[in-house]
Amino acid sequence: MISPTMDESEAPVSWSLKFTLPDWDNRASVRCSTHDYRLPGDVEQQLQTRYWFPPAFLPYLTHPAIQAKGRDTLHRLTANHLVYFLDYTTLLEHRIVNRAVEVIVHRELPIYIPLPMKHAALQLYTDEGYHALFSNQIAEQIAAFYSITRRPVIPRRITRMNALIARTPEKNRALAWFLLGFVSETIIARELLEACRDTLVSSVNDMLRDHLADEARHSRYFAEAFHYFWIAMNSRQRLFASKTLVEIISIFFEADESWLQQSLRSAGIADSDALEIVAGMTTMQARRARARAGSRPTLEALHKAGFFALPHNRTLFAKAGLIDG
Ligand SMILES: [Fe+2]
Ligand SMILES: [Fe+2]
């Protein structure tokens, strides 16, 4: 039923793996959503009680220098963050996740791809294209609302992902793309779940919810795909995958210092305060705490796939502070 390259000595995979996006025709946002992703006409009024992005998600907003400025500054900073996040999402969906999906669709790894897995990958590709579209639509409107310029920036994470691919030897490149997709897709559902709140501007919330609904299915798909690939990998590929996964997870939780500094400056925060805020975000401790909490779904998927049955992998991840030693 599964990979012809599967090592017979492996523990049998749980054959509940389906590799599908269940009921995609009736559930995918691109097929079913009726939202138009336009900012509501009463946005000014909504902002008296609602936000662009949940302030609780951005702990630096509690800094006294920002608190002292009041609600307009808070709105500007959360708008900056949302536009940055949406521009990042647009790039991530097109250039990273869909590149990973191409690896599956076009069978770039020497691993047999069952037809349902290929079919679901093509659906997922379509979903991501739509997510990029609605993310961009909302980003453009908020950028116009606040006259936000200097965008889209290339987020630091994207630059780091591209650098990772560039220095990966050709023979491992398809696998590296797949691993980027796997980490991204298992992390994003939780990120969106935390961001969705009824206290957000209505169309932002609609858009995030449409995205979240799809990503819950994508996360499961990529977790299953990883499980399947992991079993089919030889020991050389596994060694590469383990060390690359640690690196990828760390990339996803890096703070973008230069962007944050520029965002704070645009909202009138003094340079000395901005430096203090950025310094708090970029300590090793802060980054590790973010990585450990945010990558929980990825770690669960790894665990389920039997990844941590190898002592080497447990040591590697414990050293990176992702699991207990
Ligand atoms: Fe997406
Ligand atoms: Fe996705």
Image (cartoon, rainbow, N blue to C red):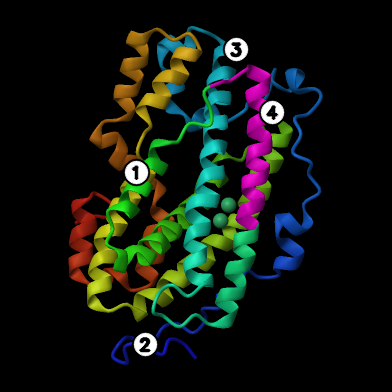
Disc nearer the start of the sequence (4/2):
2
- Looking at the rendering, the stretch of residues picked out in magenta corresponds to 127-149
Q: Amino acid at mark 3?
A: Asp
Residue 273: x and y, percent? 36, 11
Return the residue at label 1.
160
Q: Amino acid at mark 1?
A: Arg
Disc nearer the start of the sequence (3/2):
2
Return the residue at label 3.
72
Q: Amino acid at mark 4?
A: Gln
Disc nearer the start of the sequence (4/1):
4
Return the residue at label 4.
141
Whether the residue under disc 3 has CB within 8 Å of ligand 1: no
Is there a contact, CB below 8 Å, between mark 4 and mark 1? no
State left or right for residue 27 relative to residue 4: right
Is there a contact, CB below 8 Å, between mark 2 and mark 1? no
Return the residue at label 2.
5
State the CA–CA distance, disc 4 to disc 2.
49 Å
Q: Amino acid at mark 2?
A: Thr
Q: Secondary structure at mark 3?
A: helix
Give the dominant element type of the magenta stretch: helix, strand or loop. Answer: helix
Residue 65: x and y, percent? 42, 10
Q: Secondary structure at mark 2?
A: loop
